[in-house]
Image (cartoon, rainbow, N blue to C red):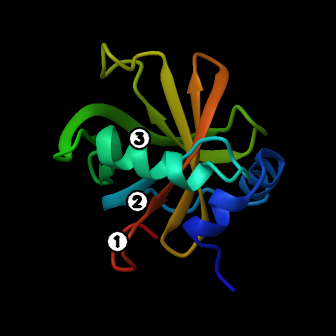
């Protein structure tokens, strides 16, 4: 049975980390991925927080795999902003290959942010957010089966 976003929201931080470290990077996504913030993982509040973040702050990412860039969909209207470079490199979590979303040279607002993603199910990526090298939160990106993975 494939893992879903709801499954991810129910996992503890240790379970999310184990899933991430046991997964391959997968292909760099292409197209629009719907985002879900995973805050307070494994608690009763995780799904509710994710809904609030989705409505008011962050809705996902739009990848251009050919150019190696993405734009975040932010705000209530899903404005495409905050650009990142996209490439494969060793993860800060376990040293294995992951897909890096690097804001250091493309954004004044998010220049200290680095995201790492790995494919955990068809069309579903699990991500880690770092501020400098400190871990902040996890997130999920869901792509239609025709794009992404």
List x then y, in percent, for residue 120.
Answer: 63, 65
| Residue labelled with disc 3 | 86
Residue sitting nearer the eye, 54 or 140: 54
Residue 43 vs 100, above or below: the answer is below
Residue 143 vs 58, above or below: the answer is below
Q: Residue at x 67, y 38 (%)?
A: 90
Residue 101 vs 28, above or below: the answer is above
Q: Rounded to the nearest whole Å, what is the CA distance between mark 3 and mark 1? A: 16 Å
Q: Rounded to the nearest whole Å, what is the CA distance between mark 2 and mark 3? A: 10 Å
The circle drawn on residue 147 is 1
Q: Are marks 2 and 1 in contact (CB under 8 Å)?
A: yes
Q: Are marks 2 and 3 in contact (CB under 8 Å)?
A: no
Q: Rounded to the nearest whole Å, what is the CA distance between mark 2 and mark 1? A: 7 Å
Residue sitting nearer the eye, 91 or 62: 62
Picture quarter containing residue 34?
A: bottom left
Q: Quadrant of the N terminus?
A: bottom right
For mark 3, give the secondary structure. strand
Which of the two discs, 3 and 1, sits closer to the camera?
1
| Residue labelled with disc 2 | 29
For mark 1, give the secondary structure. loop
* Earlier sequence position, callout 3 versus callout 1: 3
Q: Residue at x 46, y 70 (%)?
A: 149
List x then y, in percent, for residue 143.
Answer: 39, 68
* Earlier sequence position, callout 2 versus callout 3: 2
Residue 39 vs 149, above or below: the answer is above
Callout 2: few (<14), some (14-19), or many (20+) C-alpha neighbours within 10 Å? many
List x then y, in percent, for residue 33.
Answer: 36, 59
The answer to whether residue 70 shows anywhere in this view is no
**Is 35 placed left or right of 139 in the picture?**
left
């Amino acid at each position: 049975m494939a893992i879903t976003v709801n499954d991810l929201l129910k996992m503890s931080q240790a379970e999310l980390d184990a899933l991430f470290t046991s997964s391959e990077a997968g292909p760099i996504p292409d197209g629009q991925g719907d985002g879900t913030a995973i805050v307070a993982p494994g608690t009763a509040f995780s799904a509710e927080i994710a809904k609030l973040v989705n409505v008011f702050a962050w809705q996902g990412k739009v990848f251009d795999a050919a150019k190696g860039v993405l734009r975040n969909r932010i705000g209530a209207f899903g404005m495409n902003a905050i650009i990142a470079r996209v490439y494969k490199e060793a993860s800060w979590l376990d040293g294995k290959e992951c897909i890096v979303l690097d804001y250091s040279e493309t954004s004044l607002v998010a220049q200290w942010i680095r995201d790492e993603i790995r494919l955990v199910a068809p069309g579903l990526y699990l991500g880690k957010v770092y501020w400098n090298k400190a871990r902040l939160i996890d997130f999920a990106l869901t792509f239609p089966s025709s794009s992404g993975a």
